[in-house]
Amino acid sequence: LFSVDERMNMLRQVTAHLPNVRVDSFQGLLVDFCRERNIVAVVKGLRAVSDFDYELQMAQMNSTLAGVETVFVPTAPAWSFLASSLVKEVAALGGDVEHLLPSAVHGQLMKRLAERTKP
Amino acid sequence: LFSVDERMNMLRQVTAHLPNVRVDSFQGLLVDFCRERNIVAVVKGLRAVSDFDYELQMAQMNSTLAGVETVFVPTAPAWSFLASSLVKEVAALGGDVEHLLPSAVHGQLMKRLAERTKP
Amino acid sequence: LFSVDERMNMLRQVTAHLPNVRVDSFQGLLVDFCRERNIVAVVKGLRAVSDFDYELQMAQMNSTLAGVETVFVPTAPAWSFLASSLVKEVAALGGDVEHLLPSAVHGQLMKRLAERTKP
Amino acid sequence: LFSVDERMNMLRQVTAHLPNVRVDSFQGLLVDFCRERNIVAVVKGLRAVSDFDYELQMAQMNSTLAGVETVFVPTAPAWSFLASSLVKEVAALGGDVEHLLPSAVHGQLMKRLAERTKP
Amino acid sequence: LFSVDERMNMLRQVTAHLPNVRVDSFQGLLVDFCRERNIVAVVKGLRAVSDFDYELQMAQMNSTLAGVETVFVPTAPAWSFLASSLVKEVAALGGDVEHLLPSAVHGQLMKRLAERTKP
Amino acid sequence: LFSVDERMNMLRQVTAHLPNVRVDSFQGLLVDFCRERNIVAVVKGLRAVSDFDYELQMAQMNSTLAGVETVFVPTAPAWSFLASSLVKEVAALGGDVEHLLPSAVHGQLMKRLAERTKP
């Protein structure tokens, strides 16, 4: 729905008040991105048990490939059911997702979906 | 394999002896379908733990979007391994699924698969 | 920490505004309690995946023993981490659980814990 | 509820028609029992996902300690909800578990529970 | 990435030192393959809990269809994070997977990926 | 098996080469310990999926009680089956756990178990 540049811009908007956040992108392997920048650990959010099994597999692969460790931070329980794919699907079918998104992101999502359904 | 109308007809056949069952279909969001008909709760079957994680996510989204609650009913254990996708796959490869389906559904599945493999 | 009678009283207090709730207790098997009262289904809350495995086992046993079905209702996600044993443990160690309990229950829990630690 | 000897006798009764089954018992570590008898693999039943996590841990420990491998055989789905602890609990509360046990075992369970509740 | 014949050849290479291994392939249902050869049991590796749920479903279907039992052998824990799809993905992005594969397989994977990216 | 002081001494021995590790103990709630020392996050190891469900519950409770976040670090896969309770149980039954423990800890475990079984 959004290009990498569009996503990075949205992330920059919603993290603008956090001085120690930098938004970046990469192609190829995450561990190569980490090695080039001397990044020793990756932080990931965890929502549900089903996330955990896959993320653990990725974490152990990245540790084996390049010594990059992964630390997991659990989602606040009130938002544990939110997945971006589900939010996009609900919005595309006309559901009201305004309370589930930062308002800047919500505006752009509405605009993009309106463009898509135009003749 | 079957259109929405074909599926609804099969459901009507196998529930014909249950006077309080009505078969319906919808487009768009389940919660919109519920709101239009003043439906306050959705009943879903649960087979395995892996179903639960995804269904819980959907249930919490629907509760948040429109106050529609979901109640889960566990499958009889003897049928807990049955998924419609698996049954269709086995039948397409020539496996005998007669004991796994209502006979009206089995007949239509065999007929459809025979049509598909015709030259 | 609380007797059956004390728990029933607390449940009556916090459900007093719900006219269709009746609080009762039983000894022996849940399915016998259901049979004597012509109860055909039991409703249980589900918090996490780990609850589900055990509850599914109980549900299938009760269905086999007496045809009593169990329907599961998921917890609101914001409270999915709350277990009564955890709340009691935190309170016993001096943690503030006021925001996690109905206020009538909180008062009685504080009183009981104070009695217990008296010389 | 039953001593090791009583359990072994019940197992011998219910496997009497299987000529290649031998019932034995041991004290100490399973891997030592295996080593003394040149047993290279242990077969265990698996009922639910929650069994699997613990059994996998034991299997990997036994493989590390003594090269003893564990192979898992899944329960027939119709019995996946049966745990001996649950059956004993239901029977002790007066539930009818006759259809859940071999008849020889059922008889001895009923007799033992009757002895226990005698004055 | 590899045809069935290429995969069978790689399997033959890495199992050449095991005299009781035979590599074969089939089309259609696994249970039909078993029936034609009087195979009574299938052995499958299990890595993670998320594997188990799906494999249990398949095992119970195969048992129901043709009495073919499935026995599961857990992966050595040091390799529990390895999935062939993940290894291929990492290799395609330039990651070093030499320590994760038998050397004969690694050579052919590198060769195939090099052919694919040629102009 | 070991007192809090004995455990702290063993932890100090096995972390002696890590200058930024300090071993401490507390009574009462973890979140109170954190508050008194301005600790904003707790790091915990995660082995298996079954750990995760319980740890997530604790993490969300601690976040709610005092804003203390929990970050999870996965175990190296080769040690994912190791739990201290299992190691102690195996050792008590005479199993060789030398390769599963730091040698200083192993020595003290052997000594303690020998004392316990003395007449």
Image: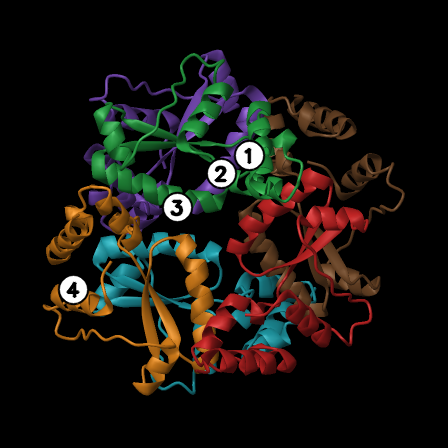
Chain colours: A brown, B purple, C green, D orange, E cyan, F red
- Disc 1 and disc 2 in contact, CB within 8 angstroms: yes
Asked if one can make out residue A78 in the rendered structure from this viewpoint, the answer is yes
Q: Residue at x 81, y 67 (%)?
A: F20
Q: Residue at x 66, y 41 (%)?
A: C94
Residue marked by disc 4:
D10
Q: Secondary structure at mark 3?
A: helix
At label 2, counting other C-alpha atoms closer than 10 Å, the crowd grade (few under 14, some 14-19, many 20 or more) is few
Distance, label 4 to label 1, CA atoms, is 48 Å
Q: Earlier in the sequence, mark 1 or mark 3?
A: 3
Distance, label 4 to label 3, CA atoms, is 27 Å
Mark 4 or 3, which is nearer the eye? 4
- Inspect the image, locate mark 2, and give the three-letter code of the amino acid beneath it: Leu
Q: Is residue A59 left or right of residue A27?
A: left
The verdict on a common chain for dots 1 and 3 is yes
Residue C54, which numbered label?
A: 3
Distance, label 2 to label 4, CA atoms, is 41 Å
Distance, label 1 to label 3, CA atoms, is 31 Å
Mark 1 or 3, which is nearer the eye? 1
Numbered disc 4: what chain? D
- Inspect the image, locate mark 1, and give the three-letter code of the amino acid beneath it: Arg
Residue B94 appears at what percent x and percent y?
A: 26, 51
Residue marked by disc 2:
C1
Asked if one can make out residue B48 in the rendered structure from this viewpoint, the answer is no
Q: Is residue D53 left or right of residue F104?
A: left
